[in-house]
Amino acid sequence: MAKAPQKKSVKNNDSTANIGFEAKLWLAADKLRNNMDAAEYKHVVLGLIFLKYISDAFEEMRARLLEGKGDYEGADPEDADEYKAENVFWVPREARWSQLQAAAKQPTIGKVVDDAMVALERDNTRLKGVLPKDYARPALDKHRLGELIDLIGTITLLPSPAGGRGAGGEGACESTHRSVDLLGRVYEYFLTRFASAEGKNGGQFYTPSCIVRTIVEMLAPYKGRVYDPACGSGGMFVQSEKFVLEHGGRIGDLSIYGQESNATTRRLAIMNLAIRGIEADFGSEQADTFRRDLHKDLKAQFVIANPPFNDSDWHRVDDDVRWQYGVPPKGNANFAWVQHFIHHLAPDGFAGFVLANGSMSSNQSGEGDIRKAIIEADLVDCMVALPGQLFYSTQIPVCLWFLTKNKRPSPAGGESGARGAKPAGGEGARRDRRKQTLFIDARKLGTLIDRVHRELTDADIAKITRTYHAWRGDPLTPSPLAGEGNRKFPLPQGEGQGEGGYQDIPGFCKSADLDLIKQHGYVLTPGRYVGAEEIEDDGEPFEEKMARLVAELNGQFAESAKLETAIRQNLEGLGHAL
């Protein structure tokens, strides 16, 4: 049984690259890949991890039913309804992990796995058409498949507190096998590694977790409808649910709506959420968001997305109701996505999304006019310029946009505008931000985790997000990113709370009004507004400093002359005088 990690170890992980068990498991699984393409092997591995998860969750629930204590007294451990009542998948006998493990060394193991997947889909309508069912194909080495099953069999659920209907009441059963589940971490880590292995194609299904965490911490989705129309493997949804749980909420406080045009990626998303007990509405099937909006009438409190950058191959209908601020150009879908997000925002909603840097300044094909109209409508709340090398799939520099339809002040715990509801994007008082936008230049943040990839650390994410919440006027609550309370990553300007807590920091952040943005031609690049970082005065008078520096330079010139003389003499001794 794996040992449960202490809370401190989670908080001290400053980078998702700093992982132990998952990394070792990946190295072992990658060795078994042999010559198989990463894009193909991904589905082999993730399908098995998913199967292991639901089998373990089933066995844990079955043990409670067999014990028959509390509300489980008299329960039938072979009744599928007992499991479905606790939001646990029913696993028929032929799909249980013990059956697969027993057959792992047999040449028929591929068919055994396929039959298990078919049985799971048959008995669980949520999984219909989702699971991979081609393990019996001749091209898949059955010996290596058996070794992979044995390897994944080493993953065990973390110890969890007693719960269920008989102890802990509503939601306790969820916490026992989901919130402390190693398999969810392994699934997420493997998604990361496959994205890296696939390179450019990896970006189709995976957004780096540090970017996802930044967006989610900025939006603070405590409760409401969350929508991602380009959801990939569902990482935005997973992080949103994590945020809720880390701040004292429950799975189910958020209603999840997603859409994905790639059928294979859509299946990854469904498994990614199911492995954590998260229910979501992904529509009836995969579909192109612009051709067929599967959630046409949805108005969400939170829109969160990483759409394809600078997509030139998209379907445009000129009289689309979504083009409220101008018809986007056929050659670039950036502002089609922006207007799609705005269209689906509730009156008190917030949107946070990733776009290429060109979206902040481009004036081609009417994009500048659309951006101007969006700015004039006072929808832009915050712009964040990110450092390069964050993505596995592209070196295009990117930025984060944060939009809202409601910048009016809201009293603590009280009304928000005319709707009479607590404001989205966190709870509590919020100051009047009308005709104002916050600019954050985070290009200098981040740490290289290898030669070509950079990652935002917990400290970086906390600096960005807490600056935004201080500017917005949110009362700061302890965050898992902030270590002990709010003291580990304090804002440079002091307490960082309320309207008086924020102040501009040259080189990092600037609160600009609409008139200043107009002066800059409606360009939203943070570097134009934050200015240059202040250089700390070392207290040494200029004349003294110049005299000291000139003396040092003269000394270095003299040393250089000595070295040159020695080198010439050595070359002359070798018969190669200069």
Image (cartoon, rainbow, N blue to C red):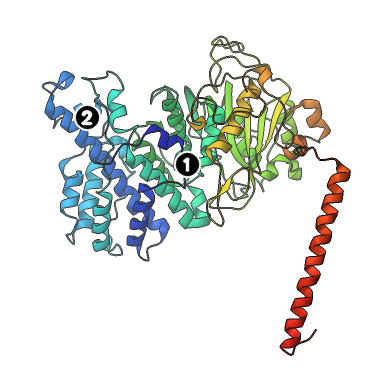
Q: Give 544 or 321, whichever is nearer the viewer.
A: 544
Secondary structure state at the residue bearing disc 2: helix
Q: Is residue 283 visible?
A: no
Q: For residue 568, which quarter of the picture?
A: bottom right
Q: What label sits on residue 83 in the rendered view?
A: 2
Give the vertical position of 96 relative to 422 (above or below). below
* Residue name at image x 28 percent, y 56 percent: 148
Q: Amino acid at mark 1?
A: Glu
Quadrant into which the N terminus falls: top left
* Residue name at image x 38 percent, y 26 percent: 251
Image coordinates of residue 486 in percent, x first then y, are: 54, 25
Residue that mark 1 sits on: 260
Q: Give 274 or 548, whichever is nearer the viewer.
A: 548
425 sits to left or right of 271: right
Q: For residue 510, which quarter of the picture?
A: top right
145 sits to left or right of 505: left
Of labels 1 and 2, the one closer to you: 2
Quadrant into which the C terminus falls: bottom right
Give the vertical position of 570 relative to 3 (above or below). below
454 sits to left or right of 49: right
Image coordinates of residue 337 in percent, x first then y, are: 60, 38
Give the vertical position of 329 relative to 8 (above or below). below
Q: What label sits on residue 574 in the rendered view?
A: none
Q: Give 498 or 315, whichever is nearer the viewer.
A: 498
Q: Earlier in the sequence, mark 1 or mark 2?
A: 2
Secondary structure state at the residue bearing disc 1: loop
Q: Using a 10 Å C-alpha cutoff, classify the residue at mark 2 as few (fewer than 14 neighbours), some (14 to 19) or many (20 or more).
A: many
Image coordinates of residue 576 in percent, x first then y, are: 75, 88
Q: Which residue is at the far bottom?
A: 575
| Count of residue discs | 2
